Amino acid sequence: MRDFIHKAFGHESFLKNILLLVSGTLLAQVISFLASPVLTRLYSPASYGEFGLFTACTAIAGALICFRYELALVIPRSKEHAAALFCLAVICCCINTVCITLLITAAGKYAGFALVSGHAFIRYIVFPIYIFCSGISSICNYWYTREGKFKYLAKRQVAYTILTVLAELCFAWLLTGDSGLGLVLGSTLALGGTTLFLFMSIIKQDWADIKQVRWRDIRKEAWRYREFPLFSSWTAVFNTLSFSLPSLMLSAYFNSETVGCYNLGYKILDLPISLIGTSVAQAFYPNIREQDTPDKKKQAALTVLRHLFETGFVPLALISIAAPWIFSIIFGEEWLVTGYYVRLLAPWLFLVFIASPVSNLYIVLNRQKEHLIMNIAMLAVRFLSLYIGGRLRHDRVAIGLFGAAGAVMWILNMTYILSKVGVHMGELFQIVKAGVKTGAKYLILPVLSLFFHNRSVFFISFLCGLWFLYGYYVKIRRGADGTV
Protein backbone atom coordinates (compact mmCIF):
# COMPACT_ATOMS: atom_id res chain seq x y z
CA MET A 1 0.00 0.00 0.00
CA ARG A 2 2.85 2.38 0.83
CA ASP A 3 4.39 1.83 -2.62
CA PHE A 4 1.03 2.57 -4.23
CA ILE A 5 0.69 5.80 -2.29
CA HIS A 6 4.03 7.03 -3.55
CA LYS A 7 3.18 5.98 -7.11
CA ALA A 8 -0.17 7.71 -7.11
CA PHE A 9 0.58 10.97 -5.37
CA GLY A 10 4.21 11.16 -4.38
CA HIS A 11 3.34 12.40 -0.87
CA GLU A 12 1.92 10.13 1.78
CA SER A 13 0.63 13.16 3.70
CA PHE A 14 -1.24 14.37 0.61
CA LEU A 15 -3.12 11.08 0.28
CA LYS A 16 -3.73 10.99 4.05
CA ASN A 17 -5.38 14.41 3.84
CA ILE A 18 -7.50 13.29 0.89
CA LEU A 19 -8.57 10.12 2.69
CA LEU A 20 -9.55 12.09 5.80
CA LEU A 21 -11.71 14.44 3.75
CA VAL A 22 -13.11 11.67 1.58
CA SER A 23 -14.00 9.49 4.57
CA GLY A 24 -15.93 12.32 6.21
CA THR A 25 -17.60 13.32 2.97
CA LEU A 26 -18.40 9.69 2.12
CA LEU A 27 -20.19 9.14 5.42
CA ALA A 28 -22.04 12.43 4.97
CA GLN A 29 -23.09 11.54 1.42
CA VAL A 30 -24.26 8.06 2.45
CA ILE A 31 -26.44 9.60 5.16
CA SER A 32 -27.80 12.19 2.74
CA PHE A 33 -28.48 9.60 0.03
CA LEU A 34 -30.23 7.20 2.42
CA ALA A 35 -32.44 10.02 3.68
CA SER A 36 -33.28 11.32 0.19
CA PRO A 37 -35.96 8.71 -0.68
CA VAL A 38 -37.80 9.69 2.51
CA LEU A 39 -37.40 13.43 2.00
CA THR A 40 -38.47 13.30 -1.66
CA ARG A 41 -41.73 11.73 -0.52
CA LEU A 42 -42.25 14.36 2.20
CA TYR A 43 -41.33 17.32 -0.01
CA SER A 44 -42.56 17.72 -3.60
CA PRO A 45 -40.49 18.81 -6.62
CA ALA A 46 -42.02 22.29 -6.17
CA SER A 47 -40.69 22.43 -2.58
CA TYR A 48 -37.23 21.46 -3.79
CA GLY A 49 -37.59 24.11 -6.46
CA GLU A 50 -38.27 26.81 -3.87
CA PHE A 51 -35.31 25.59 -1.83
CA GLY A 52 -33.13 25.61 -4.95
CA LEU A 53 -34.06 29.22 -5.61
CA PHE A 54 -33.12 30.12 -2.03
CA THR A 55 -29.74 28.38 -2.25
CA ALA A 56 -29.06 30.02 -5.62
CA CYS A 57 -29.57 33.48 -4.12
CA THR A 58 -27.52 32.72 -0.99
CA ALA A 59 -24.70 31.34 -3.14
CA ILE A 60 -24.55 34.53 -5.21
CA ALA A 61 -24.56 36.77 -2.13
CA GLY A 62 -22.12 34.46 -0.33
CA ALA A 63 -19.57 34.65 -3.14
CA LEU A 64 -18.74 38.25 -2.14
CA ILE A 65 -19.33 37.96 1.59
CA CYS A 66 -15.61 37.84 2.53
CA PHE A 67 -14.25 39.45 -0.65
CA ARG A 68 -12.41 36.12 -1.15
CA TYR A 69 -9.77 36.96 1.44
CA GLU A 70 -10.40 33.52 2.95
CA LEU A 71 -8.70 31.95 -0.10
CA ALA A 72 -5.48 33.74 0.80
CA LEU A 73 -5.33 32.08 4.23
CA VAL A 74 -3.40 29.15 2.75
CA ILE A 75 -0.68 31.33 1.21
CA PRO A 76 1.29 33.04 4.06
CA ARG A 77 3.98 30.95 5.70
CA SER A 78 3.85 33.16 8.78
CA LYS A 79 1.13 32.40 11.33
CA GLU A 80 1.00 36.11 12.22
CA HIS A 81 0.14 37.12 8.65
CA ALA A 82 -2.45 34.34 8.45
CA ALA A 83 -4.06 35.48 11.71
CA ALA A 84 -4.35 39.03 10.33
CA LEU A 85 -5.99 37.65 7.18
CA PHE A 86 -8.38 35.63 9.34
CA CYS A 87 -9.48 38.78 11.18
CA LEU A 88 -9.76 40.69 7.91
CA ALA A 89 -12.02 38.02 6.39
CA VAL A 90 -14.26 37.94 9.50
CA ILE A 91 -14.60 41.74 9.45
CA CYS A 92 -15.53 41.70 5.75
CA CYS A 93 -18.11 39.00 6.44
CA CYS A 94 -19.75 41.03 9.23
CA ILE A 95 -19.82 44.30 7.27
CA ASN A 96 -21.17 42.70 4.09
CA THR A 97 -23.87 40.83 6.00
CA VAL A 98 -25.11 44.11 7.48
CA CYS A 99 -25.03 45.81 4.05
CA ILE A 100 -26.94 42.96 2.39
CA THR A 101 -29.54 42.97 5.18
CA LEU A 102 -30.08 46.72 4.77
CA LEU A 103 -30.33 46.31 1.00
CA ILE A 104 -32.97 43.57 1.36
CA THR A 105 -34.92 45.69 3.84
CA ALA A 106 -34.84 48.69 1.51
CA ALA A 107 -35.90 46.60 -1.48
CA GLY A 108 -38.75 45.02 0.50
CA LYS A 109 -41.01 42.73 -1.47
CA TYR A 110 -39.20 43.64 -4.68
CA ALA A 111 -36.07 41.84 -3.48
CA GLY A 112 -35.45 38.83 -5.67
CA PHE A 113 -35.22 36.60 -2.66
CA ALA A 114 -38.81 36.84 -1.47
CA LEU A 115 -38.55 33.10 -1.63
CA VAL A 116 -40.43 30.10 -0.34
CA SER A 117 -43.94 31.23 -1.15
CA GLY A 118 -43.17 34.82 -0.15
CA HIS A 119 -42.19 34.27 3.50
CA ALA A 120 -40.93 37.61 4.86
CA PHE A 121 -39.27 35.65 7.69
CA ILE A 122 -36.96 34.03 5.13
CA ARG A 123 -36.21 37.35 3.44
CA TYR A 124 -35.33 39.41 6.53
CA ILE A 125 -34.06 36.86 9.06
CA VAL A 126 -33.01 33.51 7.60
CA PHE A 127 -31.32 34.83 4.45
CA PRO A 128 -28.84 37.13 6.31
CA ILE A 129 -28.12 34.43 8.91
CA TYR A 130 -27.44 31.89 6.19
CA ILE A 131 -25.01 34.04 4.19
CA PHE A 132 -23.18 35.12 7.37
CA CYS A 133 -22.74 31.51 8.48
CA SER A 134 -21.63 30.45 5.01
CA GLY A 135 -18.96 33.16 5.05
CA ILE A 136 -17.63 32.22 8.49
CA SER A 137 -17.75 28.54 7.54
CA SER A 138 -15.64 29.21 4.44
CA ILE A 139 -13.09 31.13 6.53
CA CYS A 140 -12.87 28.25 9.01
CA ASN A 141 -12.50 25.68 6.23
CA TYR A 142 -9.50 27.47 4.73
CA TRP A 143 -7.96 28.07 8.15
CA TYR A 144 -8.09 24.36 8.95
CA THR A 145 -6.80 23.58 5.45
CA ARG A 146 -3.83 25.83 6.16
CA GLU A 147 -3.20 24.17 9.51
CA GLY A 148 -3.57 20.69 8.02
CA LYS A 149 -6.37 19.81 10.45
CA PHE A 150 -8.48 17.95 7.93
CA LYS A 151 -10.03 15.81 10.66
CA TYR A 152 -12.07 18.80 11.83
CA LEU A 153 -13.36 19.38 8.30
CA ALA A 154 -14.37 15.73 7.96
CA LYS A 155 -16.23 15.83 11.28
CA ARG A 156 -17.93 19.07 10.29
CA GLN A 157 -19.19 17.58 7.03
CA VAL A 158 -20.73 14.57 8.80
CA ALA A 159 -22.29 16.71 11.53
CA TYR A 160 -23.74 19.13 8.97
CA THR A 161 -25.40 16.34 7.01
CA ILE A 162 -26.85 14.63 10.08
CA LEU A 163 -28.22 17.91 11.44
CA THR A 164 -29.67 18.85 8.04
CA VAL A 165 -31.49 15.55 7.60
CA LEU A 166 -32.86 15.51 11.15
CA ALA A 167 -34.00 19.14 10.95
CA GLU A 168 -35.68 18.69 7.56
CA LEU A 169 -37.51 15.60 8.80
CA CYS A 170 -38.68 17.47 11.90
CA PHE A 171 -39.84 20.52 9.95
CA ALA A 172 -41.71 18.31 7.48
CA TRP A 173 -43.75 17.07 10.45
CA LEU A 174 -44.06 20.40 12.28
CA LEU A 175 -44.93 22.68 9.37
CA THR A 176 -48.28 22.39 7.66
CA GLY A 177 -48.57 22.50 3.89
CA ASP A 178 -46.16 21.39 1.20
CA SER A 179 -43.52 24.12 1.18
CA GLY A 180 -39.77 24.50 0.85
CA LEU A 181 -39.71 26.35 4.18
CA GLY A 182 -38.75 23.17 6.04
CA LEU A 183 -35.82 22.55 3.71
CA VAL A 184 -34.61 26.14 4.11
CA LEU A 185 -34.87 26.13 7.91
CA GLY A 186 -33.25 22.71 8.21
CA SER A 187 -30.26 23.69 6.10
CA THR A 188 -29.84 27.01 7.93
CA LEU A 189 -29.99 25.39 11.36
CA ALA A 190 -27.38 22.79 10.40
CA LEU A 191 -25.06 25.38 8.83
CA GLY A 192 -25.30 27.63 11.88
CA GLY A 193 -24.56 24.81 14.33
CA THR A 194 -21.54 23.43 12.51
CA THR A 195 -20.14 26.89 11.77
CA LEU A 196 -20.33 27.81 15.45
CA PHE A 197 -18.44 24.62 16.32
CA LEU A 198 -15.63 25.33 13.84
CA PHE A 199 -15.29 28.99 14.74
CA MET A 200 -15.19 28.40 18.50
CA SER A 201 -12.61 25.63 18.00
CA ILE A 202 -10.34 28.05 16.14
CA ILE A 203 -10.76 30.74 18.79
CA LYS A 204 -9.95 28.22 21.51
CA GLN A 205 -6.86 26.79 19.78
CA ASP A 206 -5.39 29.88 18.10
CA TRP A 207 -6.52 32.76 20.29
CA ALA A 208 -2.90 33.48 21.29
CA ASP A 209 -2.09 34.37 17.66
CA ILE A 210 -5.38 36.07 16.82
CA LYS A 211 -5.33 38.44 19.80
CA GLN A 212 -1.92 39.76 18.72
CA VAL A 213 -3.36 41.13 15.47
CA ARG A 214 -3.44 44.93 15.16
CA TRP A 215 -5.27 47.20 12.72
CA ARG A 216 -2.05 47.99 10.86
CA ASP A 217 -1.52 44.24 10.30
CA ILE A 218 -5.02 43.92 8.87
CA ARG A 219 -4.51 46.91 6.56
CA LYS A 220 -1.18 45.52 5.39
CA GLU A 221 -2.66 42.12 4.53
CA ALA A 222 -5.66 43.74 2.84
CA TRP A 223 -3.31 45.61 0.53
CA ARG A 224 -0.94 42.68 -0.02
CA TYR A 225 -3.77 40.43 -1.18
CA ARG A 226 -5.82 43.14 -2.88
CA GLU A 227 -6.13 41.07 -6.07
CA PHE A 228 -8.49 38.70 -4.28
CA PRO A 229 -11.30 41.26 -3.82
CA LEU A 230 -10.44 43.02 -7.09
CA PHE A 231 -10.43 39.94 -9.31
CA SER A 232 -11.02 36.66 -7.47
CA SER A 233 -14.22 37.89 -5.79
CA TRP A 234 -15.78 38.82 -9.12
CA THR A 235 -14.56 35.53 -10.57
CA ALA A 236 -16.45 33.80 -7.75
CA VAL A 237 -19.57 35.88 -8.42
CA PHE A 238 -19.59 35.04 -12.13
CA ASN A 239 -18.82 31.39 -11.43
CA THR A 240 -21.60 31.20 -8.83
CA LEU A 241 -24.00 32.94 -11.19
CA SER A 242 -23.13 30.33 -13.80
CA PHE A 243 -24.09 27.52 -11.42
CA SER A 244 -27.15 29.36 -10.09
CA LEU A 245 -28.52 30.43 -13.47
CA PRO A 246 -30.58 27.25 -13.99
CA SER A 247 -32.54 27.76 -10.76
CA LEU A 248 -33.14 31.43 -11.53
CA MET A 249 -33.96 31.11 -15.23
CA LEU A 250 -35.84 27.81 -15.12
CA SER A 251 -38.13 29.30 -12.48
CA ALA A 252 -38.71 32.31 -14.75
CA TYR A 253 -39.42 30.33 -17.93
CA PHE A 254 -41.01 27.20 -16.47
CA ASN A 255 -42.05 26.42 -12.86
CA SER A 256 -40.85 25.32 -9.42
CA GLU A 257 -41.28 21.64 -10.32
CA THR A 258 -38.74 21.99 -13.13
CA VAL A 259 -36.31 23.72 -10.77
CA GLY A 260 -36.82 21.01 -8.14
CA CYS A 261 -36.20 18.17 -10.59
CA TYR A 262 -33.09 19.92 -11.91
CA ASN A 263 -31.74 20.49 -8.40
CA LEU A 264 -32.23 16.89 -7.29
CA GLY A 265 -30.50 15.66 -10.45
CA TYR A 266 -27.63 18.06 -9.88
CA LYS A 267 -27.40 16.95 -6.24
CA ILE A 268 -27.07 13.27 -7.17
CA LEU A 269 -24.49 13.94 -9.88
CA ASP A 270 -22.65 16.19 -7.45
CA LEU A 271 -22.11 13.27 -5.03
CA PRO A 272 -18.83 12.07 -6.59
CA ILE A 273 -17.72 15.68 -7.05
CA SER A 274 -18.28 16.40 -3.36
CA LEU A 275 -16.96 13.02 -2.30
CA ILE A 276 -13.69 12.98 -4.19
CA GLY A 277 -13.28 16.02 -6.44
CA THR A 278 -13.78 18.69 -3.76
CA SER A 279 -11.70 16.76 -1.22
CA VAL A 280 -8.86 16.37 -3.71
CA ALA A 281 -9.12 20.06 -4.63
CA GLN A 282 -8.88 21.11 -0.98
CA ALA A 283 -5.80 18.96 -0.40
CA PHE A 284 -4.32 19.75 -3.86
CA TYR A 285 -4.28 23.51 -3.20
CA PRO A 286 -1.59 23.54 -0.46
CA ASN A 287 0.23 20.63 -2.15
CA ILE A 288 0.60 22.38 -5.53
CA ARG A 289 1.72 25.55 -3.74
CA GLU A 290 4.67 23.63 -2.29
CA GLN A 291 5.93 22.50 -5.72
CA ASP A 292 8.80 24.88 -6.46
CA THR A 293 9.26 24.30 -10.21
CA PRO A 294 6.86 24.41 -13.18
CA ASP A 295 7.71 20.80 -14.05
CA LYS A 296 6.73 19.60 -10.57
CA LYS A 297 3.48 21.54 -10.80
CA LYS A 298 2.84 19.96 -14.20
CA GLN A 299 3.42 16.42 -12.92
CA ALA A 300 1.24 17.00 -9.85
CA ALA A 301 -1.60 18.32 -12.03
CA LEU A 302 -1.35 15.45 -14.55
CA THR A 303 -1.31 12.87 -11.76
CA VAL A 304 -4.47 14.25 -10.19
CA LEU A 305 -6.20 14.52 -13.59
CA ARG A 306 -5.37 10.95 -14.56
CA HIS A 307 -6.62 9.44 -11.31
CA LEU A 308 -9.78 11.54 -11.20
CA PHE A 309 -10.65 10.63 -14.80
CA GLU A 310 -10.30 6.91 -14.15
CA THR A 311 -12.18 7.21 -10.86
CA GLY A 312 -15.16 9.21 -12.11
CA PHE A 313 -15.72 8.13 -15.71
CA VAL A 314 -17.42 4.78 -15.10
CA PRO A 315 -19.64 5.76 -12.12
CA LEU A 316 -20.97 8.89 -13.83
CA ALA A 317 -21.52 7.01 -17.10
CA LEU A 318 -23.47 4.26 -15.30
CA ILE A 319 -25.59 6.82 -13.43
CA SER A 320 -26.36 8.56 -16.74
CA ILE A 321 -27.37 5.33 -18.47
CA ALA A 322 -29.73 4.19 -15.71
CA ALA A 323 -30.83 7.66 -14.53
CA PRO A 324 -34.58 7.54 -15.40
CA TRP A 325 -35.00 4.23 -13.60
CA ILE A 326 -32.80 5.28 -10.66
CA PHE A 327 -34.96 8.30 -9.93
CA SER A 328 -38.34 6.67 -10.48
CA ILE A 329 -37.49 3.59 -8.37
CA ILE A 330 -35.59 5.24 -5.53
CA PHE A 331 -37.16 8.68 -5.23
CA GLY A 332 -40.67 8.11 -6.57
CA GLU A 333 -42.45 8.24 -9.92
CA GLU A 334 -42.88 12.03 -9.85
CA TRP A 335 -39.08 12.35 -10.13
CA LEU A 336 -38.81 10.37 -13.40
CA VAL A 337 -38.08 13.47 -15.51
CA THR A 338 -35.04 14.17 -13.29
CA GLY A 339 -33.36 11.12 -14.81
CA TYR A 340 -33.55 12.64 -18.28
CA TYR A 341 -32.10 15.89 -16.95
CA VAL A 342 -29.20 13.92 -15.44
CA ARG A 343 -28.27 12.46 -18.81
CA LEU A 344 -27.99 15.97 -20.22
CA LEU A 345 -25.92 17.30 -17.31
CA ALA A 346 -23.50 14.39 -16.83
CA PRO A 347 -20.75 15.39 -19.35
CA TRP A 348 -20.53 18.90 -17.87
CA LEU A 349 -20.36 17.72 -14.26
CA PHE A 350 -17.81 15.04 -15.12
CA LEU A 351 -15.54 17.78 -16.45
CA VAL A 352 -16.14 19.81 -13.30
CA PHE A 353 -15.15 16.70 -11.31
CA ILE A 354 -11.78 16.27 -13.02
CA ALA A 355 -10.95 19.94 -13.65
CA SER A 356 -11.98 21.71 -10.44
CA PRO A 357 -8.83 20.73 -8.47
CA VAL A 358 -6.45 22.01 -11.16
CA SER A 359 -8.41 25.28 -11.43
CA ASN A 360 -6.61 26.22 -8.20
CA LEU A 361 -3.62 26.83 -10.46
CA TYR A 362 -5.17 30.20 -11.32
CA ILE A 363 -4.58 31.28 -7.72
CA VAL A 364 -1.21 29.55 -7.30
CA LEU A 365 0.10 31.12 -10.54
CA ASN A 366 -1.45 34.50 -9.66
CA ARG A 367 -3.65 34.56 -12.76
CA GLN A 368 -6.87 35.85 -11.22
CA LYS A 369 -7.43 38.23 -14.15
CA GLU A 370 -7.52 35.39 -16.68
CA HIS A 371 -9.77 33.39 -14.37
CA LEU A 372 -12.17 36.33 -14.18
CA ILE A 373 -12.31 36.64 -17.98
CA MET A 374 -12.90 32.90 -18.32
CA ASN A 375 -15.79 33.00 -15.84
CA ILE A 376 -17.39 36.02 -17.53
CA ALA A 377 -17.30 34.11 -20.82
CA MET A 378 -18.72 31.02 -19.12
CA LEU A 379 -21.57 33.03 -17.61
CA ALA A 380 -22.43 34.63 -20.96
CA VAL A 381 -22.49 31.30 -22.83
CA ARG A 382 -24.61 29.61 -20.15
CA PHE A 383 -27.05 32.50 -20.03
CA LEU A 384 -27.45 32.35 -23.80
CA SER A 385 -28.06 28.58 -23.71
CA LEU A 386 -30.79 28.87 -21.06
CA TYR A 387 -32.31 31.88 -22.82
CA ILE A 388 -32.62 29.95 -26.09
CA GLY A 389 -34.12 26.93 -24.33
CA GLY A 390 -36.48 29.16 -22.37
CA ARG A 391 -37.68 30.99 -25.46
CA LEU A 392 -38.34 27.64 -27.11
CA ARG A 393 -40.37 26.68 -24.01
CA HIS A 394 -38.70 23.28 -23.85
CA ASP A 395 -37.15 22.34 -20.51
CA ARG A 396 -34.92 19.54 -21.82
CA VAL A 397 -33.57 21.71 -24.62
CA ALA A 398 -32.72 24.43 -22.09
CA ILE A 399 -30.98 22.01 -19.71
CA GLY A 400 -29.23 20.18 -22.57
CA LEU A 401 -27.84 23.41 -24.01
CA PHE A 402 -26.77 24.51 -20.53
CA GLY A 403 -24.91 21.24 -19.94
CA ALA A 404 -23.23 21.35 -23.35
CA ALA A 405 -22.15 24.97 -22.87
CA GLY A 406 -20.74 24.14 -19.43
CA ALA A 407 -18.79 21.18 -20.81
CA VAL A 408 -17.20 23.21 -23.62
CA MET A 409 -16.24 26.07 -21.30
CA TRP A 410 -14.71 23.75 -18.70
CA ILE A 411 -12.60 22.10 -21.41
CA LEU A 412 -11.31 25.53 -22.46
CA ASN A 413 -10.83 26.53 -18.83
CA MET A 414 -8.83 23.40 -18.01
CA THR A 415 -6.65 23.32 -21.13
CA TYR A 416 -5.75 27.00 -20.80
CA ILE A 417 -4.51 26.91 -17.20
CA LEU A 418 -2.74 23.57 -17.70
CA SER A 419 -0.87 25.04 -20.66
CA LYS A 420 0.65 27.55 -18.23
CA VAL A 421 2.48 24.72 -16.44
CA GLY A 422 3.54 23.06 -19.70
CA VAL A 423 0.78 20.49 -20.21
CA HIS A 424 0.09 19.80 -23.90
CA MET A 425 -3.10 18.61 -25.60
CA GLY A 426 -1.43 15.31 -26.50
CA GLU A 427 -0.86 14.54 -22.83
CA LEU A 428 -4.50 15.26 -22.02
CA PHE A 429 -5.63 13.08 -24.93
CA GLN A 430 -3.57 10.18 -23.57
CA ILE A 431 -5.31 10.51 -20.20
CA VAL A 432 -8.73 10.43 -21.90
CA LYS A 433 -7.76 7.49 -24.12
CA ALA A 434 -6.46 5.43 -21.19
CA GLY A 435 -9.49 6.22 -19.02
CA VAL A 436 -12.04 5.31 -21.70
CA LYS A 437 -10.16 2.11 -22.56
CA THR A 438 -10.11 1.07 -18.90
CA GLY A 439 -13.79 1.84 -18.34
CA ALA A 440 -15.26 0.49 -21.59
CA LYS A 441 -15.66 -3.09 -20.34
CA TYR A 442 -17.93 -1.92 -17.51
CA LEU A 443 -20.24 0.01 -19.86
CA ILE A 444 -20.89 -2.42 -22.75
CA LEU A 445 -23.71 -4.39 -21.07
CA PRO A 446 -25.53 -1.33 -19.64
CA VAL A 447 -25.46 0.38 -23.06
CA LEU A 448 -26.81 -2.75 -24.78
CA SER A 449 -29.54 -3.09 -22.14
CA LEU A 450 -30.93 0.30 -23.21
CA PHE A 451 -32.51 -1.43 -26.22
CA PHE A 452 -34.92 -3.20 -23.83
CA HIS A 453 -35.90 0.12 -22.21
CA ASN A 454 -37.10 -1.39 -18.95
CA ARG A 455 -35.93 -1.72 -15.37
CA SER A 456 -33.30 -4.27 -16.36
CA VAL A 457 -31.14 -1.25 -17.28
CA PHE A 458 -31.13 -0.23 -13.61
CA PHE A 459 -30.13 -3.67 -12.32
CA ILE A 460 -27.50 -4.33 -15.00
CA SER A 461 -25.94 -0.90 -14.37
CA PHE A 462 -25.99 -1.58 -10.64
CA LEU A 463 -24.18 -4.92 -11.07
CA CYS A 464 -21.61 -3.36 -13.40
CA GLY A 465 -21.08 -0.63 -10.82
CA LEU A 466 -20.32 -3.28 -8.19
CA TRP A 467 -17.96 -4.94 -10.67
CA PHE A 468 -16.16 -1.62 -11.18
CA LEU A 469 -15.87 -1.03 -7.43
CA TYR A 470 -14.46 -4.51 -6.91
CA GLY A 471 -11.90 -4.00 -9.67
CA TYR A 472 -11.04 -0.59 -8.27
CA TYR A 473 -10.53 -2.10 -4.81
CA VAL A 474 -8.33 -4.89 -6.17
CA LYS A 475 -6.12 -2.41 -8.05
CA ILE A 476 -5.64 -0.36 -4.90
CA ARG A 477 -4.80 -3.46 -2.89
CA ARG A 478 -2.21 -4.45 -5.45
CA GLY A 479 -0.81 -0.95 -5.61
CA ALA A 480 -1.37 -0.81 -9.37
CA ASP A 481 -0.58 2.36 -11.25
CA GLY A 482 -3.48 4.40 -12.64
CA THR A 483 -5.78 4.42 -9.62
CA VAL A 484 -6.43 6.79 -6.79
Image: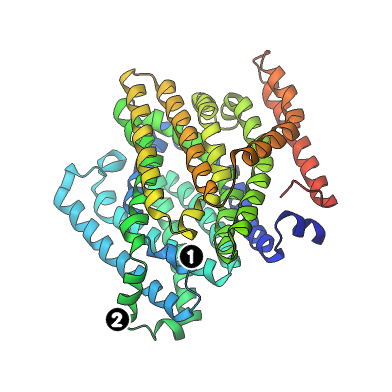
Q: Which residue is mark 1?
A: 142
Residue that appears at 40% across and 54% down? 368
- What is the secondary structure assignment of the residue under circle 1? helix
Q: Which mark is residue 215?
A: 2
Residue 299: % across, % down: 65, 54
Q: Which mark is residue 296?
A: none
Classify residue 100 as left or right of residue 77: left
Front residue of 211/466: it is 211
Residue 441: % across, % down: 77, 29
Residue 25: % across, % down: 59, 54
Q: Quadrant of residue 427?
A: top right
Q: What amino acid is found at the position of numbered circle 2 in the picture? A: Trp
| Mark 1 Cα shell of 10 Å, populated few (<14), some (14-19), many (≥20) | some
Residue that appears at 41% across and 49% down? 371
Residue that appears at 34% across and 17% down? 392
Up-down relation of residue 306 to residue 232 (above or below) = above
Classify residue 338 as left or right of residue 432: left
- What is the secondary structure assignment of the residue under circle 2? helix
Residue 101: % across, % down: 23, 57
Q: Earlier in the sequence, mark 2 or mark 1?
A: 1
Front residue of 307/269: it is 307
Q: What amino acid is found at the position of numbered circle 1 in the picture? A: Tyr
Q: Residue placed farthest to the left in the image?
A: 106
In this rendering, does residue 274 appear at all?
yes
Q: Quadrant of residue 394?
A: top left
Residues under labels 2 and 1: Cα distance? 22 Å
| Mark 2 Cα shell of 10 Å, populated few (<14), some (14-19), many (≥20) | few
Residue that appears at 68% across and 63% down? 16
Classify residue 463 as left or right of residue 321: right
Quadrant in the picture for the N terminus? bottom right
